[in-house]
Amino acid sequence: MATRSQPPEPQRPAPRLYLVAPPAADPARLADAIAEALGAADVAAVLLPIAGDDERALLNSVKALAASVQSAGAALLLDGRADLVARAGADGAHLTGIDEFSAAVASLKPDRIAGCGGLATRHDAMSAAEAGADYVMFGEPDQRGHRPSFEAVLERVEWWAEVFEIPCVGHAAKLDEIAGLVTAGVDFIAVGDVIFSDPRGPAAAMKDAMACLAMPEAVE
């Protein structure tokens, strides 16, 4: 007797890059470096940490940067400043920790992206998803520059990819971590300092990141 074949499991889209800009009191000063990076690679989103007390100046700078990022086909996310997202013309915000996320998500949804990082436990990650996170991030450094071991990041990404449909972002501190994250099932790979500190410039580093993304099996 013939058996009914099982439909193939849906495949996740190929992973894309998620660019994390360096902190800057004046985001406009990052415009050239970000534009160079975006021109060299396919980037899904740019995360912009901003600081400073002059709200009007911040808004003007972010508005100008948002137009440039969005014209390149990427979303602009503000790090922690959900209150500025709509007025600055950004696409959403990245919130750190379940408490910050829970406090801000209602102001962003449903029109803006709400991402969540700083998730120390599996329970926190699941809570963020249940609260409406558009993605969760694993492995990013904290305010002191510390992050989990890469093995721990891979374990968390593998678990998430096997169980949840909501996308996850894995942070790559080095280009040679990209291959492992791809194999683990990540949806987006966050790259930041490894791009902007490259002495060759952001474009060269982004091209290397794209090569790692496209051919992870070739990267040791």
Image (tube, helix red, strand yellow):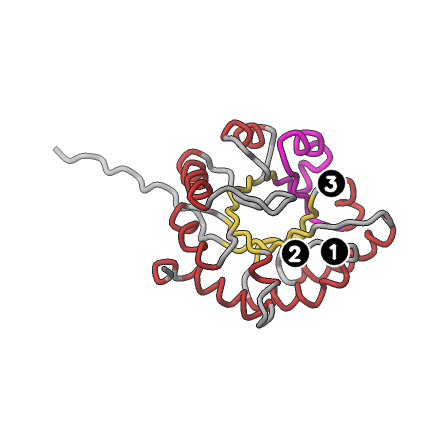
Question: Residue at 68% of width from left, 33% of height from top?
Answer: 100
Q: Position of residue 72 (x, y in %)?
A: 64, 62
Instruction: Indicate the secondary structure of the residue bearing disc 2.
Output: loop
Query: Given this view, does label 3 or label 1 mark the residue nearer the observer?
Result: 1
Quadrant where the N terminus is found in the figure: top left
Query: Given this view, does label 3 or label 2 mark the residue nearer the observer?
Result: 2
Question: Residue at 45% of width from left, 37% of height from top?
Answer: 160
In which image quadrant can residue 151 be found? top left
Q: Spatial distance from mark 3 to mark 1, Cα to Cα?
A: 17 Å
Verify whether residue 33 appears in magenta. no
What amino acid is labelled 1 in the image? Ala
Residue named by callout 3:
82
Verify whether residue 114 appears in magenta. yes
* Image height of 13 relative to 108, above or below: below
Instruction: Indicate the secondary structure of the residue bearing disc 1.
Output: loop
What amino acid is labelled 2 in the image? Ala
Q: Position of residue 115 (x, y in %)?
A: 61, 40
Q: Which residues are magenta?
A: 89-115
Q: Which mark is residue 24?
A: 1
- Residue 92 lies left or right of residue 170; in this view the side is right
Q: Which mark is residue 21?
A: 2
Q: Earlier in the sequence, mark 3 or mark 2?
A: 2
